[in-house]
Amino acid sequence: MKTRRPALIAIGSNVGQRIDHVRWAEKKIASLHHCRLLFHTSLYKTTPIGTTWQMAYINALLIIETGLTPQALLRQLQALERRRGRIRKGIHWGPRVLDLDIVLYDDINISEENLLLPHPGWPERSFWSIPALEFSGLKIARAWLKNRPKARMRRVGIQPVGRF
């Protein structure tokens, strides 16, 4: 049996039926081989980074337990993005049908061309750090959250919009 490790996955969408895209991604991630969904946050409407002319994002976080390596998990997540219509060309921080990020993978640090762990945006991005408060009581997440600088917790441009 493969050793399973916890991973924090971020889901975002700001094109089309945003809530539908996020809910679809949650179901597909939960059904990936060697993955088990442990927790999901509420849905949040957030201001986009960079270009502000685009629609607001709908974001959520998932905690999964996985037997996949970080690289294999990334490939699976990118395949889901492509299935939903994501094209990885164009404007950096531009509109996205679906954006899936591995934010944290257990306590592993990786610095590769296509994968940085922890994600460099953790914990500055309020669309991750605010929803993360929902799982602060889970034993699995305590180490992740204790290293988060509290000074960076801002509620600017984020509001809850519902549950899964």
Image (spheres, grey):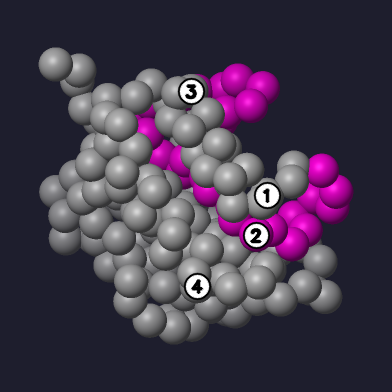
First reached walking from the N terminus: tag 2 or tag 4? 4
Q: Secondary structure at mark 1?
A: loop
Answer yes or no: do the residues labelled 2 and 4 have beta carbons within 8 Å? no
Mark 3 to mark 4 CA distance (whole Å): 27 Å
Which amino acid, by three-letter code, is at mark 3?
Gln
Which amino acid, by three-letter code, is at mark 2?
Val
Residue 115 falls within the magenta-colored stretch: yes
- Examine the rendering and report whether any part of residue 137 can be seen: yes
Q: Residues within 10 Å of mark 3 (few under 14, many from 20)?
A: some
Which amino acid, by three-letter code, is at mark 1?
Arg
Q: Which residue is mark 4?
A: 19
Q: Residues within 10 Å of mark 4 (few under 14, many from 20)?
A: many
Residue 97: which numbered mark, if any? 2
Disc 3 vs disc 4: which is toward the camera? 4
Disc 3 vs disc 2: which is toward the camera? 2
Residue range of the region highlighted in magenta in the rendering = 89-116
